[in-house]
Amino acid sequence: SSGINAEYGVPGFIETQINGGFGVDFSSDIKHLEENLSMFRKKIVQHGVTGFCPTIITSPSEIYHEALPHLKKQRGSAVNGAAVLGAHIEGPFISVNKKGAHPEHFIRSECLASEEEINQFFGSTENISIITIAPELKYARQMIHLLTMQNIVCSIGHSTSNIDDAEGGVNAGATFITHLFNAMQPFHHRDPGIIGILSSIKIKHQCYYGIIADGIHTHPAAIRIAHRTNPLSAVLVTDAMQAMGLGDGCHKIGAQSVTVTGKHAVITGTDTLAGSVVTMNSCIQNFMKNSRCSLVEAINCATKHPAQLLKCKSVYGTLDFGTAADFVIIDSDVNVMATFIGGDCVFLSEKYKGFSS
């Protein structure tokens, strides 16, 4: 009756790791961050995303002081677009040996051991939702504990950690793994490292894991292994950067120059991956195909699971009574037909412009 040949209405997608897109990079051009964020919020809804954590890669302390006040947590709306769910601070407390696209000269070899040090370094943690930390670093467990007491999600990643340090980080309070398989020690049968957390019997609580299902970062077999080992903890992330939505060319992530060719984004002049250009609905498509899970299971990895991770399931990630009424109309291939925030339509695909509420 609506005129849309739709098949499914699902909760709005939640993105916990996204560096930018549509020409926006959250780690640079801080002077225009507020207006860039405003534009980004309105554009990301076309891919079904109704809430996201803008991600800042390893940067000097002053960048956090300048940027974080512009990344206030905000509800989504028909006027403003997707919800801002707090910043994901990826670094600088990571391993220099697993830095990926992070600038080495800003990486810190020790974590912060007191609340006073944390506040001095970031200025304020009020707008932070997630921080990625390498659990093998000195004072890592102390910092994870302190941040967890502030209701900040600690994620372990960009790390050379062995299984003991990984379990120690989780038991100190970490509840997430940053882009599983990437920027960490490969699985070894005598020491599975961070990957071993998926089946550890020594951790005291559930630990979710991010996975980039873009066809580049993670092999289909690895996706199947992760999903079959621990399906209820999978969280789909894009790790998308400035070039998402723009195409090939020279772009940036923080202060780093990035060359994009097709689906590949690499630090210019190297073969080091520098985020992705994939969209969340494409990640869901790829994950469903590669893991051979059901559509419902794949959708949960982009809705229910990240909402549980962020402890915002009472508002986002489901279509339960009393939640925010953020939802997406998709077809069976997870193409986004329409996106609604607070019950208001904020995006309608060209194919279905004839739809009238």
Image (cartoon, grey):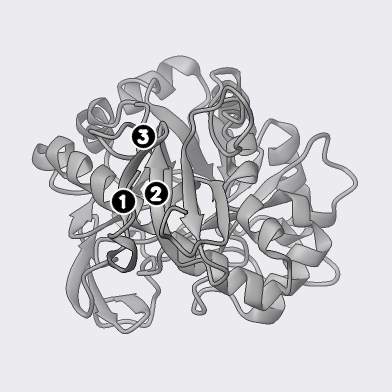
Between residue 138 and residue 90, name the one nearer to us. 90
Name the outermost residue toward the front: 1
| First of labels 3, 2 by sequence position | 3
In the drawing, does residue 39 fall left or right of residue 309?
left
In the rendered image, which residue does mark 2 sit on?
Answer: 339
In the rendered image, which residue does mark 1 sit on?
Answer: 347
The residues bearing labels 3 and 2 have C-alpha atoms spaced at a distance of: 16 Å
Q: Is residue 26 visible?
A: no
* x, y percent for residue 241: 31, 61
Between residue 136 and residue 39, name the one nearer to us. 39
Secondary structure beneath disc 3?
strand
In this view, 177 is above or below 309? below
In the rendered image, which residue does mark 3 sit on?
Answer: 84
Which residue corresponds to the image point at 72% horizontal and 61% vertical from the top-left?
195
The amino acid type of the residue labelled 2 equals Thr
In this view, 35 is above or below 290? above
Q: Are marks 2 and 1 in contact (CB under 8 Å)?
A: yes
